[in-house]
Image (cartoon, rainbow, N blue to C red):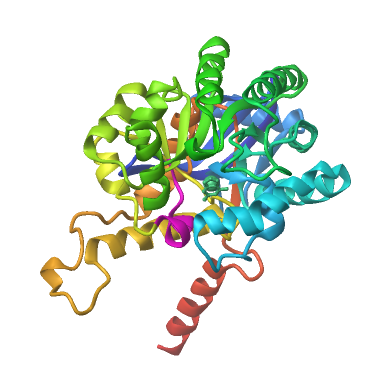
Amino acid sequence: MTYSLVLQATAFHSTGPESFEILENRLFCINRDGTLGAVLAPGDPACGPCLDESKRAGIFTRLGKGQFLLPGFIDTHVHAPQWAQVGKALDTNLPVWLKNYTFPLEAAYKNLDFAQEIYADLVDTLTANGTTTAQYFGSVHPAPNKLLADICAAKGQRAFIGKVVMDLPDQCPDYYRDESAETALADTEEFLRYCAGLNRTVPQDIVGVITPRFIPACSDEALRGLGALAAEYGAPVQSHCSEGDWEHAFVMARTGLRDTKAHLRYGLLTQRTTLAHSVYLNDDDAVLYKKYGANIAHSPLSNIFFAGSVCPVRRRLDQGVIVSLATDISAGYTPSMFDAMRQAVLSSRILTSGTDPAAPAARRGSPGSAIDFRHAFYMATLGGATALRIKAGQFKKGNAFDAFVFDCNAPYSTAAAMKATRLRICCKK
Ligand code: GUN
Ligand code: FE
């Protein structure tokens, strides 16, 4: 038999921002390279021979009652070094948080023993939470970024990783910045090559990403150079865009352009670009995202701390912009994409209804902004795959079989608790 595993299971996957499919009692036939070779529905004449052969070959398995298959989550914006401060240091605003807590922490990863300990724990934690693909910001220094790539490669996580570029002396501290635009570009290029080499040795993707931290921290020379590298290598790009009033106004004052247009001018708005937050886009900016194929990494939890408002993702989805979902560790304090999905729904409900009880209901919010679990599940899976241009996020022939088991009977599962409650209610009757 050519397959490495045949799995009988019921699965759920997203088929679009407002739709999903239940694949009931299918045979998932997984190739030796980890891709899906076939998905057979009951009644398909190929099922009988497939079952017989896979059982004979000892590669057949079936999920138990209450166990379901879900596509692995795709977290498109994680700051790997910030894992060490997750859930802490959220008592201030973005520029102060960067200066007082985050830059000193990220600089500490020059110590590779520290980097090894934290990065290994992060990758284990994310995968344990069902995140089979993550797009990471690393730090400025080359060595810990290579270590992060090695760890993802060894642990089997599909990873997009960026060496962070921040070279402007008046915005970045002496102890934590690129020496010059020239060294920033050389280190970025070397890291792209390093990841490309590593990628040839693993079944999943390990991809280097062009990563200007955000326009305020980078010189024009660095930004232009990174845009040129993105074109030369066809490499993905990630950054922060229109996150808050402070950042948005800073970019406007320096470049005379809105943040989206500035990214475009530097060659950083491409079909492989992920821009975290993107809260303060106007509709013209959104049109540019759509035209160039860039995606929004929606980070609902961190937006509560640092953005100062809610990103109108329903509107952006309706406009045809690609929206993915992200934890934004550590401005977002949870490693769980289930939490991120819940938060996305909550934030959208608040946007729709408004927040000020003193305002009349009719003027309190932005009606029509609510999303539900369908949009959230889309953003966490298929939206992320579309954003990163990977064949994953859905159980389709030819896609990577990136998946996890959702077990309703797992100890402490709230799904199990709900079932128990229902049983108890039934028994009382
Ligand atoms: N803008 C620039 N750097 C960062 C960061 O690390 N986190 C967030 N949320 N915004 C940023
Ligand atoms: Fe971020």
The furthest residue to the front: 170
Tell whether position 5 is magenta. Answer: no
Q: Residue at x 53, y 65 (%)?
A: 92
Q: Name the residue nearer the viewer: 370 or 95.
A: 95
Q: Name the residue nearer the viewer: 265 or 196.
A: 265
The furthest residue to the right: 113
Count of numbered marks: 0
From the top left corner, tell me how far across and down residue 17 is, in percent: 33, 41
Q: Name the residue nearer the viewer: 75 or 218.
A: 218
Q: Residue at x 11, y 68 (%)?
A: 362
Q: Is residue 378 visible?
A: no
Asked if residue 233 is positioned above or below residue 418 in the image, the reply reads: above
Q: Which residues are magenta?
A: 297-307
Hey, which quadrant is residue 248 in on the image? Answer: top left
Asked if residue 409 is positioned above or below residue 147 in the image, the reply reads: below
Q: In the rendered image, which quarter contains the C terminus?
A: bottom left
Q: Residue at x 62, y 40 (%)?
A: 132
Asked if residue 381 is positioned above or below residue 86 in the image, the reply reads: above
- Compared across the picture, whether 343 is left or right of 371 comes to right
From the top left corner, tell me how far across and down residue 137 is, in percent: 62, 39
* Predominant secondary structure, magenta span: helix
Q: In the rendered image, which quarter contains the N terminus?
A: top right
Asked if residue 84 is positioned above or below residue 142 in the image, the reply reads: below
